[in-house]
Amino acid sequence: MSLQDLHGLLSNLQRNPGIPLDLDWVDSIRVNRSAAERRAATLPARRTVKKKYQAAWLLRAIACMDLTTLGGDDTPGTVRRLCAKARRPVRQEVLAALGAEQLGVRVGAVCVYHQMVPTAVEALQGSGIPVAAVAAGFPHGLSPFAQRLDEIRSSVAAGATEIDIVITRAHVLTGDWRALYDEIAAFREACGEAHLKTILATGELGTLTNVGKASAVAMMAGADFIKTSTGKETENATLPVGLVMARQIREYLDRTGYKVGYKPAGGIRTAKQSLDWLILMKEELGNEWLLPDLFRLGASSLLTDIERQLEHHATGRYAATHHQPMP
Ligand SMILES: O=C[C@H](O)COP(=O)(O)O
């Protein structure tokens, strides 16, 4: 199956409509941090990707990547260059050497601030690559609620088909699950047909138990994806957090029959880290979560290292980083 076909599967997935808030379920969630850390530590050690398959796995990581720029210094020019990279993330000669020219390699989405949505939509026209916008007072989620809803609607009107919202961390830290549920459900409604990715900012939630509970509430409220971090917290995506969230996704599937996607984001910079995340998905959720409709890696600089590793697979040599220019 080509990577284009994988992207084609996107539209066939039934969206999670959400379910009523189930507080008994939320109360029952308890996470033992040391057990989660031990299990997460064994994942990269127990399962490695054999060298001959590594290039294919790295191409898969690219297909699942939300290529991101969320800088205060973003300009239409840098966003256009990023979109050009999104269309052709790996140099032609590297793909040719890997025998992967026909795969149609491209990224999962391009993720930008609202201001840059029209530029990205125009630059990606005809590519089939969705534009994701961060919204709802990103990164802290503390602007007036009505404004956060407006922001979502404006990004959808501008052409974003995926909306990455942030939650009010205080709702989690005070255990106000009803407020969290209502907030996310309102964001989902404001998204309309656009897919809702719910950023939990896990590094600010205090405990893994809170991460588990917030994951469950977000899915109950209708999140299409749950996502770890904004990339702006001190602690971003970690494997123990990934394990907790993946297990909640599995639990939600078992109880409701709905598949919710997963997006680790923030601090994922090396090809090796991207393989660790793919292994975690395969082990905990199975092969369907290795496809862009259910898995994304949010990253601003990961592609540079993946391209470097692919070049090494293709030629046996490492190129200087400046040979894989990013905007
Ligand atoms: O959602 C994506 C993150 O903002 C990217 O974080 P990063 O710059 O650490 O890769």
Image (cartoon, rainbow, N blue to C red):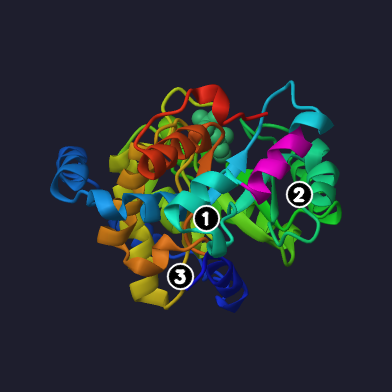
The relative height of residue 293 versus residue 85 in the rendered view (above or below) is below
Badge 3 local density, few (<14 within 10 Å), some, or many (20+)?
many
Q: Are marks 1 and 2 in contact (CB under 8 Å)?
A: no
Q: Is residue 101 visible?
A: yes
Label 1, label 2: how far apart the Cα atoms are? 25 Å
Q: Quadrant of the C terminus?
A: top right
Of the numbered discs in the image, which one, if any, rests on residue 7? Answer: none
Q: Residue at x 70, y 35 (%)?
A: 137
Label ID, residue 152: 2
Residue 239 appears in which quarter of the rendering?
top left
**Where in the figure is residue 121, as x and y percent of width and height?**
80, 51
Sequence-first tag of 1 and 3? 1
Instruction: Say whether marks 2 and 3 touch (CB < 8 Å).
Output: no
Q: Which of the two marks, 1 or 3, is nearer to us in this view? A: 1
**Residue neighbourhood size for the residue with mark 1, other residues' Cα within 10 Å, grouped as few (<14), some (14–19), many (≥20):** many
Q: Earlier in the sequence, mark 2 or mark 3?
A: 2
N-terminal of the two: label 1 or label 2? 1
126 with respect to 180 (left or right):
right
Q: Residues within 10 Å of mark 2 (few under 14, many from 20)?
A: many
Amino acid bearing label 1: Ala
Which label sits in the foreground, 1 or 2?
1
Rendered location of residue 7, percent (x, y): 58, 67
Q: Is residue 267 left or right of residue 242?
A: right
Q: Quadrant of ligand 1?
A: top right
What's the mark number on residue 63? Answer: 1
Residue of label 3: 259
